């Protein structure tokens, strides 16, 4: 075999492999659709997503015309929306004559932000098939597309590239274990090249991109720092929380799961919690689960939904059975606990309490959350593996006010020193 024939043969084999991988991916998306429809019969969250995706094209058809100039923002869920919001806000100001389409994949993002003023049209992103990608882009034809952090959908991104439409990825965070950097991940790897530029949270993510010959990347940091720092510029007053706190030391536990709450039950019921107020904001606000939590407490508790000012002063535990106010509640914390890392559910946002200058305690499962490790290294956050360590750290922070304030100040300084990603992104876009 000549060198030329050998080269052609290798090219044919690579092309065949790519076709097979693409076929497997598209079959996988089809099967995912079937699984979601089946799961929707038993789970309300999945049902909302299935129904919502079915309505996407009608919503676009009824709210857009071919003459509209548009921008497209895509977020996997609520956390990515909050991450992208400071960028979205500035683009909204600049592109006053454009319609903004905001898409979510997860119901937890769509259901909470479907009426956000930042967008003109909010929809579920259809499943990533070629037909859906073509139809979706036929409707919106965006001048600029921004994806936040991840949710890399090859068919949508390849269609954007085919149509020569601008797209950037912001606040991206990559790990070497991800398929983009593996031999079997060619389909996803190729999709990354649809972005004309990628803004990463850290240098390691940029190096990983460089390792696959993607070189149009900038380390801008995490836009969440800008987002939470902006929280200091708004009014965070909640009169009922002031009444409840009543100038006493207050511990706020945000986005807690059963593993987190078990630790608090033991601590609240102990002598160590004397003269301390507790605000618990569960991630799951189903009433039956909250009632089980209340039944295990030896102290008086009250729900946000049943609060009466006259009861709040003499109540030890305030349970937040609503969504949307936790960030403001953190401003009243003397010590914060952020849930999710005692189990395998994933650590929730630790930057929200950090900006208010309070020390933070989390569980020990925070491997995939670099900002948490950075805060720990900075000296303002503590990771605990069990009840014993939980009690020890809380007692130290309660008794030693100087230590408590120093830890909190370190967290606030960390946020301030890491903001600025938004400016770099807007500068790239020449805004």
Image (cartoon, rainbow, N blue to C red):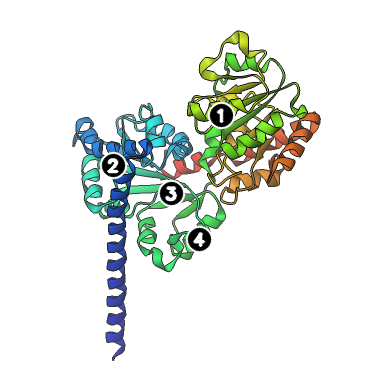
Q: Secondary structure at mark 2?
A: loop
The quadrant holding residue 335 is: top right
Q: CA distance from mark 3 to mark 4?
A: 14 Å
Q: CA distance from mark 4 to mark 2?
A: 32 Å
Q: Nearer the viewer, mark 1 or mark 2?
A: 1
| Residue 59: mark in rendering | none
Look at the picture and state if 330 lies above or below 361.
above
Residue denoted by label 2: 142
Q: Secondary structure at mark 4?
A: loop
Closer to us: 165 or 399: 399
The C terminus lies in quadrant: top left
Closer to us: 375 or 360: 360
In x, y percent, where is residue 108?
41, 36
Residue denoted by label 1: 292
Mark 4 neighbour class, 10 Å CA radius: few under 14, some 14 to 19, many 20 or more: few
Residues at discs 2 and 3 in contact (Cβ within 8 Å): no
Look at the picture and state if 430 lies above or below 355.
below
In x, y percent, where is residue 10?
31, 79
Residue denoted by label 3: 150
Q: Earlier in the sequence, mark 4 or mark 1?
A: 4
Mark 2 neighbour class, 10 Å CA radius: few under 14, some 14 to 19, many 20 or more: many
Q: Nearer the viewer, mark 4 or mark 1?
A: 1
Q: Earlier in the sequence, mark 2 or mark 3?
A: 2
In x, y percent, where is residue 328?
56, 24
Look at the picture and state if 209 lies above or below 144.
below
């Amino acid at each position: 075999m000549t060198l030329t024939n050998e080269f052609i043969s290798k090219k044919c084999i690579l092309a065949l492999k790519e076709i097979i991988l693409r076929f497997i991916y598209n079959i996988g998306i089809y099967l995912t659709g079937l699984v979601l429809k089946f799961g929707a019969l038993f789970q309300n969250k999945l049902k909302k997503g299935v129904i919502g995706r079915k309505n996407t094209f009608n919503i676009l058809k009824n709210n857009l015309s071919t003459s509209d100039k548009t921008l497209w923002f895509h977020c996997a869920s609520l956390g990515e929306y909050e991450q992208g919001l400071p960028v979205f806000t500035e683009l909204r100001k600049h592109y006053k004559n454009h319609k903004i389409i905001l898409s979510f994949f997860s119901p937890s993002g769509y259901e909470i932000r479907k009426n956000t003023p930042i967008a003109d049209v909010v929809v579920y992103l259809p499943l990533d098939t070629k037909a859906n990608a073509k139809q979706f882009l036929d409707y919106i034809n965006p001048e600029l597309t921004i994806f936040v952090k991840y949710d890399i959908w090859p068919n949508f991104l390849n269609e954007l590239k085919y149509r020569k439409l601008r797209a950037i990825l912001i606040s991206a965070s990559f790990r070497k274990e991800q398929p983009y950097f593996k031999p079997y991940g060619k389909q996803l790897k190729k999709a990354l090249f649809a972005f004309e530029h990628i803004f990463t949270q850290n240098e390691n993510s940029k190096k990983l991109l460089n390792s696959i010959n993607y070189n149009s990347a900038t380390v801008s940091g995490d836009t969440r720092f800008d987002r939470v720092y902006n929280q200091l510029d708004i009014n965070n007053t909640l009169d009922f929380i002031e009444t409840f706190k009543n100038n006493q030391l207050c511990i706020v536990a945000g986005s807690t799961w059963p593993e987190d709450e078990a630790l608090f039950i033991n601590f609240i019921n102990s002598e160590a919690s004397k003269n301390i107020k507790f605000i618990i904001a569960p991630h799951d606000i189903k009433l039956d689960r909250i009632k089980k939590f209340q039944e295990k407490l030896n102290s008086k508790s009250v729900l946000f939904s049943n609060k009466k000012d006259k009861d709040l002063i003499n109540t030890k535990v305030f349970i937040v059975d609503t969504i949307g106010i936790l960030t403001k509640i953190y401003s009243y914390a003397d010590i914060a606990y952020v849930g999710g890392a005692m189990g395998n559910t994933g650590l929730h946002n630790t930057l929200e309490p950090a900006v208010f200058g309070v020390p933070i305690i989390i569980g020990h499962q925070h491997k995939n959350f670099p900002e948490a490790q950075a805060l720990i290294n900075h000296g303002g956050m503590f990771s605990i593996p069990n009840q014993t360590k939980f009690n020890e750290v809380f007692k130290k922070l309660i008794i030693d006010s100087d230590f408590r304030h120093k830890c909190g100040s370190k967290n606030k300084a960390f946020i301030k020193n890491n903001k600025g990603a938004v400016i770099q992104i807007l500068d790239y876009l020449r805004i």
